[in-house]
Amino acid sequence: MSVSALDSAARERIPSEAMRTISFDRGDAMPLLGLGTWKSAPGEVSAAVRAALRLGYRHIDCAAIYGNEAEVGAALRESIAAGEVTREELWITSKLWNNAHAEGAVIPALTRTLRDLGLAYVDLYLIHWPVAMSPARMFPESGADLVSLDDMPLSATWRGMEAARAAGLARHVGVSNFSVAKLRGLLEEATARPEVNQIELHPYLQQEATLAFCRAHGIHVTAYSPLGSRDRPAGMRQRREPVLLEDPTVASIAARHQATPAQVLIAWALHRGTSVIPKSVHPGRMAENLAAERLALDAADMRAIAALDRRRRYLDGTYWSNFGGPYTLTNLWDE
Ligand code: NDP
Ligand code: 1BO
């Protein structure tokens, strides 16, 4: 059956039991395909999450900095109250913002997120960036707002994350935007490994070495910005960026499978064993993206997509390095 033929089924509802999952300890299973919520505006994200849950999504990717966790929480509560889903069926990820990296700041930050989401625990809590900032700022305005990793080591932040897990506020803990070098450093000092590393991954940024390292160390990888993140704020875009959703190779693979480019990009991420969290606020697109679970790419498709790598970061991290503070693109990505 073609993927487009599956769209109508997906619009009705793909039962959660049909979703592919990855197992974590304590018997927990994370659906490999989740819904991103960055840039989903407070006025639209509740309806989007509610629609996503009706379609069969069970994994929602959130973060304090997205500024919409209260609205996401309202949708979760409504769906649970309506009997459409139970808390136990859901996988909710959130992330610690850069201004709460002090060991003792982690549990208070997570407590605020839990209050906003209306939950007693998150399934996964991630250190959002390996970048520390003054508690007074949400985004840096000068180099003085940033705190170096020598002064605020990631190992201290990680102890706070482990304490959050021990307190039952997060069932699993992990990191995001961590290079192999930073993962190595953390593994040397931490009592427990991060369970997940959430990083930018798509055909233009395939990060094979990071994937191999994570696989070898039992760290699951989640792919963010899998569709190329076209709705990023202007300040985070570069001039003349390549448009992933318009890539001719992706388009021709999509045409051959009677699928869409977005479905090819999502299926490619799943084929590599990563989880993937495309963002949309439109039910039609959410259904289309969910149906990508059923798209089987073949070896020739995977070879053609492998050739597209151009080590292109859409989220290049310049917003941490623009100010002459302690962060540079070299020490951020360790490349
Ligand atoms: P994505 O790559 O998911 O792209 C989102 C864009 O694609 C939106 O403009 C959306 O529009 C559009 N879109 C969605 N589905 C389709 C479709 N089927 N066809 C055409 N266009 C489509 O970008 P994000 O950067 O949002 O990444 C996904 C998620 O990953 C984030 O929302 C966030 O949860 C997470 N993330 C985490 C980061 C981290 O640092 N850990 C960094 C970046 C992202 P519309 O909504 O209008 O449908
Ligand atoms: C700075 C952007 C964060 C998206 O997750």
Image (cartoon, rainbow, N blue to C red):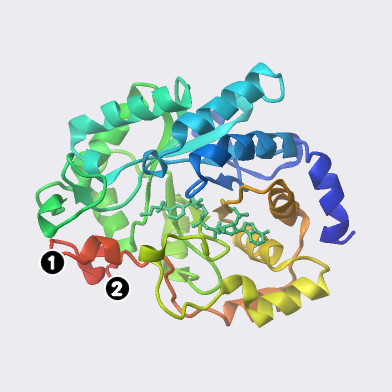
Depicted 224 relative to depicted 61: above or below: below
Q: Residue at x 36, y 43 (%)?
A: 65
Front residue (pair 221, 251): 251
Q: The disc labelled 1 sits on which kind of residue?
A: Gly
* Label at residue 324: 1
Ligand 1 is found in the corner quadrant, namely bottom right
Q: Residue at x 34, y 27 (%)?
A: 112
In whole angstroms, how far apart are the C-alphas of marks 2 and 1?
19 Å
Residue 32 x, y percent position in the rendering: 61, 47
* Label at residue 335: 2
Q: The disc labelled 2 sits on which kind of residue?
A: Glu
Q: Residue 265 sits in which quadrant?
A: bottom right
Q: Earlier in the sequence, mark 2 or mark 1?
A: 1
Secondary structure of residue under mark 2: loop
Q: Residue at x 13, y 54 (%)?
A: 148
Q: Residue at x 51, y 74 (%)?
A: 204
Indicate if the residue with disc 1 has its beta carbon within 8 Å of ligand 2: no
Residue 266 x, y percent position in the rendering: 64, 60
Count of numbered labels shown in the rendering: 2
Q: Is residue 181 visible?
A: yes
Secondary structure of residue under mark 1: loop
Q: Residue 134 sits in which quadrant?
A: top left
Q: Is residue 24 visible?
A: no
Depicted 203 relative to depicted 233: above or below: below
2 or 1: mark nearer the eye: 1
